[in-house]
Image (tube, coloured by chain):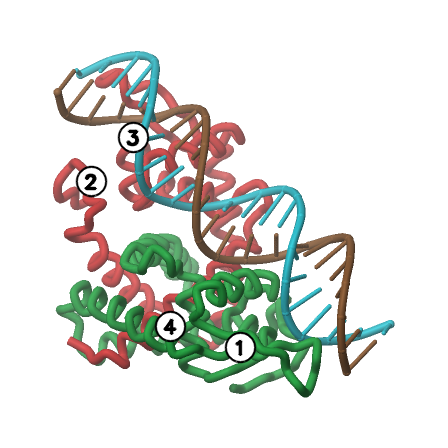
Chain colours: A green, B red, C brown, D cyan
Amino acid sequence: MAEQAQYEELVRQFSAFGAVKREMGRTLPSDCPAGSAAVLTLLSRHGHMRMSKLAELLAVDMSVTSRHVTHVVERGWIERSPDPADKRSRILRLTPAGEAQVDRLSRCTTEMLARRLSDWTDDEVAQLTRLMARLRSCFDEQSPRTPATPAITQ
Amino acid sequence: MAEQAQYEELVRQFSAFGAVKREMGRTLPSDCPAGSAAVLTLLSRHGHMRMSKLAELLAVDMSVTSRHVTHVVERGWIERSPDPADKRSRILRLTPAGEAQVDRLSRCTTEMLARRLSDWTDDEVAQLTRLMARLRSCFDEQSPRTPATPAITQ
DNA sequence: TATTGTTATACTCTATAACTATA
DNA sequence: TATAGTTATAGAGTATAACAATA
């Protein structure tokens, strides 16, 4: 349990993080904004899934997910096929072109981070990653935005 | 210098951080969105300053700063007076009502963080704060958005 | 001419609510 | 009735460019 001044400083860093996000965004291809990149990355990492699952991983409303997915489908990077088991659902899956795009994105962001964080050690990068992951998990739990399906752990 | 897989994981956390930001935003008063809160916090921390300085601290374009400031001025939280030394400039200063609002915001976000991070130690909070500050500094330097005034260190 | 700041316009991301189709 | 997904609408945040006033 930390003190008020510490929390205020943390909030300040949260706010300033926007600049990092925007700078990351500038390195992305112009036809692949951050929302699309997130969709592709998650599908690459977790494999095919339904809209609702993707919305949960993105931690945004399904209406938002739907728009991102439409954008990505229009570019041929993922396919959206009906789920035979439940005709309301649609299964999302990366196309070969989508996998190529994921590679491009990965190279793109990796190079930029390698440049920006050239004086960070492996361990420092890992620490930041771990702390941010933990932070997110603390904001996931007991959220008013908890999805219908309770306690999905991967 | 870290490896590609590590960077990809870090990028994933960057992307997911949006959920934290949005949850933070939900605790703010409805007439004080994140942009306004950032303006107030920076003025409280650094004292009165000009638009250009505030834009630099916010790390956004001055046009964006101008809109946020207008919103905050309209609510009576800061005053925007002409700079006698340079009639193009305007000096921004918290009003007493603004200071009260800063206190409200601080209590608000502090309580929320104390609730969310109840099982974090002081040291862990400090670590995350430090790493995020360093991250930001790595993205500030040599940025294409470097402001006209070179190397302002507080 | 260059700089400070404002405004107009456009784009991205997000949520809420209304809707369709299926369970 | 309830759930999966889409679409319409609205709001916040941002950047670029054109502009006014001053240096």
Q: Nearer the viewer, mark 4 or mark 1?
A: 1
Q: Which residue is mark 3?
A: B50
Q: Is residue B104 visible?
A: yes
Q: Nearer the viewer, mark 4 or mark 2?
A: 4
At x 36%, y 77%, the residue is A99
- The amino acid type of the residue labelled 1 equals Leu
- Coordinates of residue B81 in the picture (x, y in percent): 37, 21
- Chain for disc number 1: A
Give the secondary structure at mark 2.
Answer: loop
Q: Residues within 10 Å of mark 2 (few under 14, many from 20)?
A: some
Give the secondary structure at mark 4.
Answer: helix
- Coordinates of residue A109 in the picture (x, y in percent): 27, 67
Give the secondary structure at mark 3.
Answer: strand
Q: CA distance from mark 2 to mark 3?
A: 14 Å
- Chain for disc number 3: B
Q: CA distance from mark 3 to mark 1?
A: 50 Å
Q: Which residue is mark 1?
A: A92
